[in-house]
Amino acid sequence: MSFDLTACLGRDEDLLFLADSTVEQAKLLHMTALLQNQVGFVSESVPFLSNLSAIENITLGTMYTQNISLQKAEKRIKPAIATLGLDGFMHMRKESIPQRELAMAMFLRCLASDNRYVFLESPSVLVLSTVFDCRSRVDSRVHFWVSCLMPDREYYRDFDLKPMLPQG
Amino acid sequence: MHAALIGRIGRFTLDRGHTYIHMASILGQVAGAFLRLSFLNHVVRRVLVKQIYFTSVEAVPVIFGSALILGSIMVNALLALLTSLGAYDQIGEYLLKVMFYELAPITCTIVLLLRSGTAIISEVALMKINREMDTLNILGVDLMEYIFLPRILAFIISGPALAFCFSIVGLIGGFLTLGFFHDITFDNYVDQLFLAVQERDFFILLLKSFFLSLAVVLVCLQKGITVRSSFTEVPIKLIQGMMHTMFMIIFIEVFFGIASRLL
């Protein structure tokens, strides 16, 4: 039993992956991690680095893969930071950032890395509503892939997510 | 009884062998990253600058302090001995040999181990336990380039640089603190040092410090990265790292001792 992620890659809609077990959910996370460039993460499983500030974490992937300076990478994401009102948090470490703002910063990391999809592993309703709000405020075209256990699907009924079941 | 003993020796040898192979593998991969000029990447360069700052610049007060104290003791003891024997022409040679060949490289390596080596073990181990390495993988950042290369470069640059500073501060400062009690003037003392010093002395100082620093950083990185998933492993790896590094320091000391005799 597993999810067909390659079929999901072309879909322009938000998806809800319903896993039967935590093992299957972990497997889904690992499979998604293999799609490095296309999928970004707003998840505790892919945390910010504790010795870097928020802005360094957000731009790390871009700086490394494109070999550009922090100033240049920051300039690209600056409008989105300003729109979300996160300027005051950019030089803080992750320990000092509240949960909601941390979720927003992780969403910005996905935007900075040009990810088409954002994966969230069993997010709280607060985190999910925060990233939905962020997407509309910055007018982004990314889509959300949310994974949860089958019994938890009710938590997400207020969000427009297309349910996906494992195949095989 | 014998079988159990042989088994334990075999287990010890395999464990140690595995550690050295792993260290050699890290070194090989980092050398590859170095040859690809990965240190020119903006991200890697930022980490390298930070690491050099933490390893060398922040260690300067400790190095200067210990150079003054140990230099004073050494200069005082050797001057007392050599002047009492009337061996004025040997002063420069003895002081330089003790300082360049033994005191400076070993003291700086121990300072590096205690300050930065322990920091590397805990930092790398915590990065692994907190899944920060998964983040790096997902962002497409090469661990060898981001974690290993800057730390190894910082150590092999800082070790020889600090040992050189230690030697100068120890020799000059050592005389200025306690040297005036002896029957030799500062001018004469400096002349003796200049007459005795050879290029070979600097070469050995830098080379020995280089290898000692490389051994420290490789052991610390290897210990840090082999933590699995529990915080309780960190202090165990720290102790293992300390012991292993001390063993490596002794080995390099013996190697250089024999090599300097043969050459």
Image (cartoon, grey):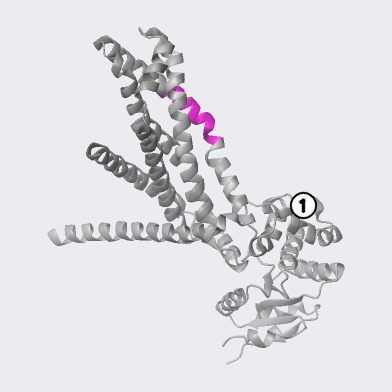
> B86 or A119, which is in the foreground?
B86
Q: Is residue B217 magenta?
A: no
The residue that appears at 79% across and 66% down in the rendered structure is A130
What's drawn in magenta, residue-wise? B58-70
Relative horizontal placement of residue A38, taking residue B95 as reference (left or right): right
> A68 or B131, which is in the foreground?
A68
Q: Is residue B64 magenta?
A: yes
Q: Chain of mark 1?
A: A
> B176 or A151, which is in the foreground?
B176
Q: Is residue A121 visible?
A: no
Q: Quadrant of the C terminus of chain A?
A: bottom right
Total numbered labels placed on residues in the image: 1
Q: Is residue B182 above or below residue A76?
A: above
Q: Which residue is mark 1?
A: A89
Relative image position of residue B121 (x, y in whole percent) = 47, 50
Q: Secondary structure at mark 1?
A: helix
Q: Is residue A67 above or below residue A139?
A: above
